[in-house]
Image: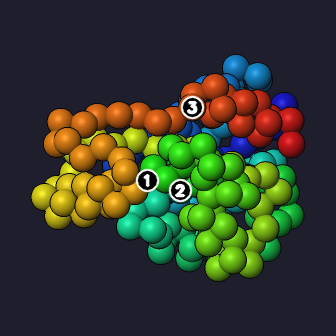
């Protein structure tokens, strides 16, 4: 069985929650899995892993600069082994934007990065206004208003398709 590293970049914790589910599926299938935030990715020997998976959230239309820097620094090592990337964003709640080839943020990432992950996926995130600071709450509500999403301050809605997350976890084990 494989030794898998899952790295994540999260804003409010939901990407980590998705990674935990992927880890659970992979471990159930007999794989060893290490889960780390992307900021700690440089502290481990990446070459000791058989497969590397990176998951990242979007905030205000962008992935974290830490993610981009990590990928730029380690792209050649990533390319040497089976790898995967997934993006977590609320725009993926829309059926026409919930696939790697139709999600604007994943497509933007691919245009801006020299890395070509072997497996790609996109998962819809969640909205929980109670978690956000006042500026984020205002901005996210404005974005939701423009995109016809929920704007009520008591909104806590999770759009993630957990079956799809588990399917991706099994795919990681097979790649």
**Which image quadrant for residue 117?**
bottom right
Q: Which mark, by number, is residue 161? A: 3
Residue highlighted by disc 2: 56
Task: Work out whether mark 1 precedes mark 2 in sequence or the reverse, and give the earlier one.
Answer: 1
Query: Considering depth in this image, is 30 or 168 the residue closer to the camera?
Result: 168
Q: Is residue 13 left or right of residue 38?
A: left
* Cβ atoms at labels 1 and 2 below 8 Å apart: yes
Question: Looking at the image, which residue sits at the far left?
Answer: 134
Residue 125 versus residue 170 in the image, above or below: below
For marks 3 and 2, give the CA distance.
16 Å
Residue 130 versus residue 8 in the image, above or below: above
**Which image quadrant for residue 150?**
top left
Q: Is residue 18 left or right of residue 12?
A: right
Q: Secondary structure at mark 1?
A: loop
Graded by Cα atoms within 10 Å as few (under 14), some (14 to 19) or many (20 or more), the crowding at tag 1 reads: many
For marks 1 and 2, give the CA distance.
6 Å
Task: Work out whether mark 1 precedes mark 3 in sequence or the reverse, and give the earlier one.
Answer: 1
Query: Considering depth in this image, is 93 or 169 the residue closer to the camera?
Result: 93
Graded by Cα atoms within 10 Å as few (under 14), some (14 to 19) or many (20 or more), the crowding at tag 2 reads: many
Quadrant position of the N terminus in the picture: top right
Q: Position of residue 62 (x, y in %)?
A: 47, 69
Residue at point 21%, 51% (across, down): 132
Q: How is the image coloured?
A: rainbow
Q: Visible in this render: residue 74?
A: no
Q: Secondary structure at mark 2?
A: strand
Task: Work out whether mark 3 precedes mark 2 in sequence or the reverse, and give the earlier one.
Answer: 2
Q: Position of residue 168 (x, y in %)?
A: 71, 36
Residue highlighted by disc 1: 10
**Which image quadrant for residue 156?**
top left
* Cβ atoms at labels 1 and 3 below 8 Å apart: no
Q: Position of residue 98 (x, y in %)?
A: 62, 47
Residue at point 69%, 71% (across, down): 110
């Amino acid at each position: 069985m494989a030794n898998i590293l899952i790295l994540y970049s999260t804003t409010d914790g939901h990407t980590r929650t998705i990674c935990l589910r992927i880890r659970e599926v992979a471990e159930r299938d007999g794989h060893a899995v290490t889960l780390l935030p992307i900021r700690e990715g440089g502290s481990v020997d990446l070459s000791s892993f058989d497969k590397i998976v990176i998951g990242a959230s979007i905030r205000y239309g962008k992935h974290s600069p830490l993610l981009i820097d990590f990928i730029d620094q380690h792209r050649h090592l990533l390319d040497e082994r089976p790898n995967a990337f997934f993006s977590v964003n609320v725009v993926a709640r829309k059926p026409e934007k919930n696939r790697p080839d139709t999600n604007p943020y994943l497509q933007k990432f691919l245009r801006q990065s020299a890395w070509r992950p072997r497996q790609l996926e996109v998962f819809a995130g969640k909205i929980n206004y109670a978690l956000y600071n006042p500026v984020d709450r205002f901005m996210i509500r404005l974005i939701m208003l423009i995109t016809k999403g929920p704007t009520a301050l008591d909104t806590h809605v999770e759009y993630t398709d957990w079956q799809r997350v588990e399917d991706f976890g099994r795919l990681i084990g097979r790649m």
